[in-house]
Image (cartoon, coloured by chain):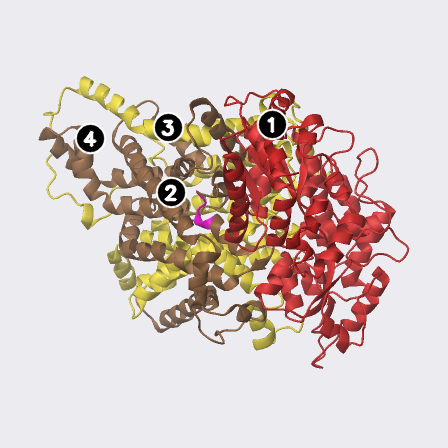
Amino acid sequence: MTTTATRPDTAAPSPAPARSQLPRRGTQQRKDRRLAYLLILPAVLLELLIHIIPMVLGVWIAFIELDQRSLRNWLQAPFIGLDNFARGLDPTSAIGSEFLGSVGRTAVYVVLTLGVSWVLAMAAAVFLTSSFKGRGLLRTLFLVPYAIPTYVGTLAWGFMLNQQDGVVNQVIVDVLGLTNDRPYWLIGDNSFISLVVVSIWSMWPFAFLMLLAALQNVPTEVYEAASLDGASNWKQFWTITLPMIRHANAALVLILGLWLFNQFNIPYVLFGPQSPGQALLISPLIYQNSFLLWDFGAGGAMSFLLLLALLVVSVFYIRLVLPKGGELDD
Amino acid sequence: MTRMKTIAGAAAAAAVVLAASGCSAGGDAGAEGGSITWWATQQTATIGDSEAAYQAAIDRFSDETGIEVEFEVIPWADLYNRILTAVSSGTGPDVLNIGTTWTGSLHDTGALATIEGETLDWLGGSDRFVPAVYEAAQVPGETQDAVPFLSNVYSLYYNPTLFAAAGIAEPPATWEEFVSVGQQLTVDTDGDGAIDQWGYSGAAANVQQNAHMAFILGQQFGGDFVDDEGESTLDSDEQVEAVEAYVGLMTDSQIMAPSNAEIDLGADAVDQFINGDAAMILQQNPIEQFTSRDFSDWAIAPTPVLADGEDVESMIAGTNITVLVDSPNQEQAFQFVEHMTSVEEQAELASAFGLLPVVTDAYDEPLLADSGDTTLEVRRDAQADASAPFPLVGNIGEIEAAVGNAVRESFQAYATGGDADVAGRLAAANGQVR
Amino acid sequence: MIETRGFKVARAITLTLLSIFVLVPLWVIVTTAFKPLSDVSGSFIWFPSEWTIQPFIDMWSTVPLARYFTNSLVVTVVATAFSVIVSILASYALARLSFRAKRPFSLVILSTQMFPGILFLLPLFLIFTQIQRTIGLQLTGSLLGMIVTYMTFTLPFSIWMLTGYMRAIPAALEEAAMIDGTGRLGALFRVILPVARPGIVAVAVYSFITAWGEVLFAAVLSSNATRTLPIGLQAYSSESDVLWNQLMAASIVVSIPILVGFLLVQRHLVAGLSAGAVK
């Protein structure tokens, strides 16, 4: 992370040069260290309680036979080693093919949703950085889907995508006359498209917000200089804007990608507890196995594999995209 | 059982209950006082209405026994998860309502307190319950841990005006008549080339309702979800035939709109009936919705059955009431169960919710006998003589999900231009069941 | 950028299409809320046959909306407040102090960001009940359980963002204060916090939105008395009826406070993000 960009609101009035009037180095460092651990203590405790310990327990669940019979005394549930994984990874079994299918589907879903959201957000952010009448209004409007709760927007979409009475088919069939048969949007192959569209609708404002913020950091003088050199807007976008906001892009892809990969709320509200097969993502599948079928072992094994995959992807990604000198390095 | 006997019996039973459950009450030995918690099922469109009816019953209980009842009305959609978490944590309420179709699964968890011998006698014995309903609350050959609470059945609701317009005098009694009457009622009323009135409407995307229909028709065809050993038989010839008959309403006789494949709420199917888009529905309890929409153009008849099939018109639907084995207040909890299944309360609750009582004598209470409720006779007959319990096996939840989802997928595949492939999907569903 | 003709045309077209995309669902929500129930059950109509505010009146009695609203507000505000405080403390340590556990701590924080919620729903519940039994602290079915959970959910992102923000603040600023005899903590509160306000606002908004809309854990961790809005609103559709107009009316009401708050701090939010997360 760099500290070179100008930011008027935080510019120091007149920083006094640090001199060795501070207490002796050694003591200060020791005090600092103690203070540091004190400061991170609350975060560590919370992370332990809510994330780490449940995580370890969740991994253990993947290795035991936890179902309605053993649930009550879950500490004594029989250990069955890798059986749950064998079931989850066997592409010939119903549960295995469902799991592997949903992994691929989720990957496509993430790429599509993220890609389109990014394009929409980038376009909106670039255009709304230029000045014109109504800019403030549009900026506000575009943030509304992020500000209202996800389930509210998703409920409305479910209402709109109804085959018989929904506004989407009304426009497609009755107004535009694109087709005679009313297509289904919440079941069958189209349900995946619907899931992507609804996800874009509620996710792109976040990307917009991040990119809008990132564009504030690109000094206008750079553009002016480029324009004088005769670079087109299009070329400026590729040679100036994109490189200058690459950290923002990297962060955005990471955050949004993880959110989308773990997506649960939107399919759950849009389709109910059981997603149609064509739109079944990983998190809803784990939910179905664990909480509708009481097959916690299978759910746990899937979760464990999912987590491993995410870890590997993220480690590579962080190495690849986030530069050295970021907050991970000292 | 009279109130006097209740109190006398309670004291006597206390020791029995405690001994039987091996649980220390850790409180006063007398039956008076104390407090218990109860998770109740939502039986009306709004939680508030359910709360009001339960509160009245609880007030009578508290007046009588001095026991306070803290209760929570839980929507059906949340109940299964809440029970699950209660079972896994041992921190549930004292008294718990469960769906009748979950009896097998919850018995398997071992989380429910046993109701047997003297405890059962004290509850008034098994004889006072409607036999078919009582049977559905216990796993054969195993210890009993639930008694019925409120009951419901599937019936045929039809629109007499649409029937008259089509020149049909009587509601269909057999499945064959149901299909042919349905075809007569499936018409294009405004002549625009598109059918706008259908014979039947159902929530074809609703897993539970699909499973229920698969079960009822399966029974009629002589099939079942499980065999005597408890192995799932979802792909048996009879069961496949039955589901093909149901899915055939859309794919074959076409009396059900393909768009029903998208309906996942029973209420939406009922809505179509109210709007005149469908002439018949098979439902458990649409009357509250009829009333709230000021809709009166309906009549009731028994669920049609296969001409030469078993007379099974419904599964035993509704709610059972149980006490959790971890409850430290078993004595008061069973007292509460006794109260809620008393003749008086059964009449009160059944009448408030439009459900059926589970205790035979409750039907003679003026509240029900003189209610003028025309549906009561039809539904009572189905409850007593023409219903079968959902299979009482531990993995019934899984079986229900598997079969209901297979039926849903068949409908949806057909609606979106694919092959319903009932046999294939049922075979896959059967393979999914552990 | 030079605003060429092509640029302006592209801008007009893109922004118009985006506006339609954003607006149609909002239009559906708003008009449905003002429709009588009979308008809602049939084909969609763009304008109500008659505008009625009845759904806005009925919704309070159909579902104990006021109670759910209060619950959501308490949970969200308290969780946000504590989450912000915890993040400030941790980020300061990460941004300014050197200690051996720094790298592992940052890695763990970052990686918990990727845990799918579904993964630890049941384990978390089991742990909560264990705590409940051991020390009697009621964590399931209570507001406290949800508060603790939600404040942790937002920690990774908040700490990550605030650390970036604090690093960008020149160290000389607080050193000046420390020369004047103020300790580290004093400098943090008197010097860093005022300067870091935009970053803190951004983190608070993020936490608030996350907690306000959470569905999955609320379904398992809340009870009747502590039910929050996302779960409570489902009660408008039951097995017996779906009251779409009241549901949409209630959706509007639950969205308005957060929407207004969001728009008020929007400017800070963009400033905060631009200095912290996206650099």
Q: CA distance from mark 3 to mark 2?
A: 21 Å
Q: Residues within 10 Å of mark 1 (few under 14, many from 20)?
A: many
Task: Determine the chain carrying the residue at label 1.
Answer: B
Q: CA distance from mark 4 to mark 1?
A: 53 Å
Provide the residue span drawn in magenta. C226-230
Asked whether the viewer can see residue B80, the reply is yes
Residue tagged by mark 2? C75
Residue tagged by mark 3? A44
Whether residues under marks 4 and 1 lie with C-beta atoms below 8 angstroms apart, the answer is: no
Q: Who's brown, chain-wise?
A: C
Task: Identify the element where label 2 is drawn.
Answer: helix
Tell me what hue chain B is rendered in: red
Please give left or right for residue A98 compared with residue A216 in the image.
Answer: right
Task: Determine the chain carrying the residue at label 4.
Answer: C
Viewer-closest of A322 and B381: B381
Residue tagged by mark 1? B325
Viewer-closest of C194 and A251: C194
Q: Residue at x 41, y 31 (%)?
A: A47
